[in-house]
Image (cartoon, rainbow, N blue to C red):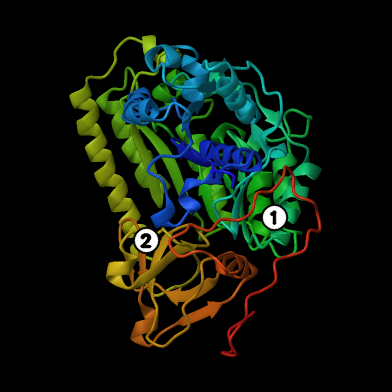
Amino acid sequence: METLKTYDVRTHGCQMNVHDSERLAGLLETAGYVDLASLPSGQRPDVADVVVFNTCAVRENAANKLYGNLGQLRPAKQANPDMQIAVGGCLAQKDRSSIVERAPWVDVVFGTHNVGSLPALLDRARHNKAAEVEILEALDVFPSTLPTRRDSAYSAWVSISVGCNNTCTFCIVPALRGKEKDRRPGEILAEVEALVAQGVVEITLLGQNVNTYGVEFGDRLAFGKLLRACGEVEGLERVRFTSPHPAAFTDDVVTAMAQTPNVMPSLHMPLQSGSDRVLRAMRRSYRSEKFLGILDRVREQIPDAAITTDLIVGFPGETEEDFQATLDVVRASRFSSAFTFQYSVRPGTPAATMADQVPKEVVQERFDRLIAVQEEVSWAGNRELEGRQVEVLVAPGEGRKDAETERMSGRARDNRLVHFAVPQGAERPRPGDAVTVEVTYGAPHHLLADSGVRGGTYAVRRTRGGDAWAALQEGGTPGATRKPAVSLGIPTVGAPAPQPAAVPACGVLD
């Protein structure tokens, strides 16, 4: 009997890395490996036969985190020399052969441009009994042509472009991901339609700067057209995208969002700083007035839009006046939430050698003040939603305390996190189903919707996404994690949809 070979892909960083990890998992499964997490807990070895680290180079502690994890695996490698360790992603692209120098028990190092090479590199390292390092300088195969092992039955990432043409002084991503390369619209829509045929009800269009999509083939209105085209895909309920760049955000995109019902009223718009002087030093080609103008136009056409952002505190040369300008823009923007970062030196970026690096204690103090202001803004915005009905797409893992609080969780159409109570004796929705509830309390970071147990609104709508999730669970082994099957490259358009699970005669909407 052939020995079972297992893999474990560990992801650090952004949505791009999460999506790349789905590709890596798909490649390994087509090569005959089995996801370690998919095995029942009693049959699961302590360490997989192949462990892959998909790394990030954006955060300051990325290298420390990687080498700490590699150090923890060294005893397992010594005990089982046939075990293989691979390192990919942005940090691999940046540090290259130095990874093997610092951690000689690593078998494979591959970059952001050659994800598809992983199985061959593992085979070569095994045959040659030596580390294989392969870093390409440009993309050889667009990632979406590779096999994919998605994490969700009802929600999926769809990559529309890779790379970035901007030159922000704090960011190393363009150097590691390369210039922007766009997929043709027909390829994107073919993948979307095939995913929907498999039961997906929500997609997120993914790109380093999604709203510059079309630059490679000369259509500056391509992204708005793509959103409208997604609106024509029957069965696709929710469309999201991340992340746009304010400098390239045009009114046709706002109008397309407003006029396309399945494009969600949520927008992630990275501000980074509210100071025009700092934005200039960052090489962010917009200013605070333009940024606020975009938000005004979005809210004119989409009044209920929830807008989130990215903010950096302590960029070199930032003064107290600059920081106050950021606080002013944060208050004026009324962000529903913000990803806030303390600036840290990224070797290889222009900002790393700038004068007037802000002392750590000053950065920390400003960071704490920014968090307090944003929390105040978020809380006020969430309290305004009390008493409103929201439709929640149910998701496992969104609520860390669901078991203790006897609630379920998911995302509203505007992407706010909602924890809701299920009335006793009422139908319990499946992941991928939609639930309509009434917000009973707006907390700073989430909404509570206990209307069902208070005699108010609670309605379940079973979806094809819930059917797809249920189909995966049928015949599953207790203790195992069930995930969708591997898609071999771009799925075939018109593939048969999964058969719906049995629906009890309880009057819920199909």
Q: How many marks?
A: 2
**Image location of residue 67, percent across then percent down:** 35, 24
- In contact (CB < 8 Å): disc 2 and disc 1: no
Dot 2 falls on a residue whose secondary structure is loop
**Image location of residue 148, percent across then percent down:** 64, 44
Picture layout, residue 117 above or below residue 477:
above
Among the two numbered marks 2 and 1 on one chain, the one whose residue lies closer to the N terminus: 1
User: Looking at the image, which is closer to me, 473 or 206?
Assistant: 473
Q: Which residue is mark 1?
A: 195
For the residue carrying disc 2, how many other residues have a C-alpha within 10 Å: few (<14), some (14-19), or many (20+)?
A: some
Question: Looking at the picture, which amino acid does disc 2 mark?
Answer: Gly
Image quadrant assignment for residue 381:
bottom left
Residue at left offset 54%, top offset 39%: 21
Residue at left offset 63%, top offset 76%: 501
Dot 1 falls on a residue whose secondary structure is helix
Please tell me the numbered disc located at residue 399: 2
Residue at left offset 33%, top offset 52%: 377
For the residue carrying disc 1, how many other residues have a C-alpha within 10 Å: few (<14), some (14-19), or many (20+)?
A: many
Question: Looking at the picture, which amino acid does disc 1 mark?
Answer: Leu
Image quadrant assignment for residue 383:
bottom left
Picture layout, residue 23 above or below residue 504:
above
Give the quadrant of the C terminus: bottom right
Decide if residue 124 is in sight here.
yes
